Image (cartoon, rainbow, N blue to C red):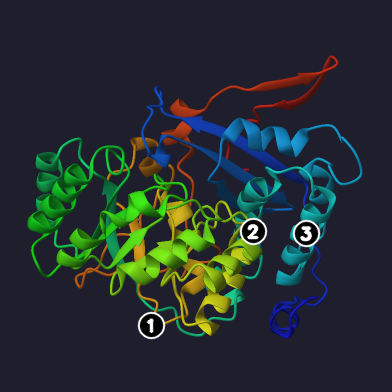
Amino acid sequence: MVSIYWCRVAVAMLIGGLTVKIDAVDFFYLSMPEVLDIGDGSQDLLLVRIVAGEYIGWGECEASPLVSIASYVTPMSHSACKPVRDSVLGQPIDSVEDIRRIGDQVKANSLDLLQADHTLSGIDMALWDLLGKVQQSPVHTLLGVKTAYPKRPYASQLFGDTAEDTFRLAQAVRQDQYTAAKFGWGPFGWGGVADDIDQVMAAREGLGPDTALMIDAGTVWADDLTRAQGRVDVLKQCEVTWLEEPFVSGAFDAYRSLSELARPVALAGGEGCHNPWQARHLIDYAGVGFVQIDAGRIGGITSAADVARYAQQRGVTYVNHTYTSHLALSASLQPFAGIANNEICEYPVAPKSLALDLTHERLDRDEDGMIHVPDRPGLGMSIDIDAIRPYLVDVDIRVRGQTLYRTPELTNS
């Protein structure tokens, strides 16, 4: 059922007499020359371009690019496993309600196509960007936000290979005057408890006592509470704000048990949620204090905004998950731009050059160390076509002699 909120927003945003329809949806697989076996999602990306008349919108999928392209063009398997393309091309896009309608069609027609939500995420972002340009309005305004509040970025990066490396990384964060930092993945959780204790203490020592510290375990313990709880004491000792993703997203019992053991350290999770219902279950049953949503995975800005409102109702702090480009960062900030007390946001400090080169604009910190949601139409970001050409991967998908996908021409038109 469509919420009253969305009906009101749709009515408020309708343009009298103007109709545009989706003429083209193009995917561009961009990649670093070498993709390393590390927890760094900025090494490749899938850029989405949507054309509707004279307007263009851009989005980004946080997913394996080739698999998402395949889900867009794959031949129909059965009535609930259609290509994402069938629900998008030719659709009118005049209001925010059209974006939700298109998303609902994708979810219904591609119900059994498990990559569909990831593919939809980039499409949904691009639709919001496009509609904002049509209506000359920032996306957060289309979402009904009256005041877009600045966000406090935490420097998000991987643990060093050794505790000494982590200490040096933490010192650099402190010197760069971030007020919060997160260390994750790398060797954390794969060795003994003593190794992890050293890593956490090195991060705290390098940051100093006044910088907020978060730890990301990257689901390393699956659902093994016994392994995870050995790190609780050092998290408390180092006054860690949250322990992120100690378990996979569906391990609600393990999450809740650890959340009780770890207090006052909160648990965080949600980047692995591929739809709003998974996020709601995490909020309701896992005992998390922070829900972290990736607009490039959950189905786009539309689904992320649904979760942000639900989290606020349930007293859980909403945080963006973003580890790629500033296009994705802008999209990830839109859903909670209007929530004043949900201030902290993820901010990748060491992305690969691909992520930095994607856009002309960057969301840099102001003199107070805060970042601001762009107030330009759409997502407020423009693609640097010349800079990203070297990263473009040529792809040709053929089935039964028919070309289903060929890398489109990379242009701004």
Q: Residue at x 41, y 40 (%)?
A: 42
Q: Of helix, strand and loop, which one carries label 3?
A: helix
Outermost residue, front side: 226
x 31%, y 65%: residue: 242
- To which residue does mark 2 refer? 275
The correct choice, above or below, for 9 with respect to 40 in the image is below
Amino acid type at image mark 1? Asn
124 with respect to 233 (left or right): right
How many residues crowd mark 2 within 10 Å: few (<14), some (14–19), many (20+)?
many
The mark nearer the N terminus, 1 or 2, is 2
How far apart marks 3 and 2 lie (CA) works out to: 15 Å
Which element is circle 1 on?
loop
Q: Which mark is residue 341?
A: 1
Mark 3 sits on what residue?
Answer: 102
Question: Residue 412 at x, y = what percent?
Answer: 58, 43
Q: CA distance from mark 3 to mark 1?
A: 32 Å
CB of mark 1 within 8 Å of CB of mark 2? no
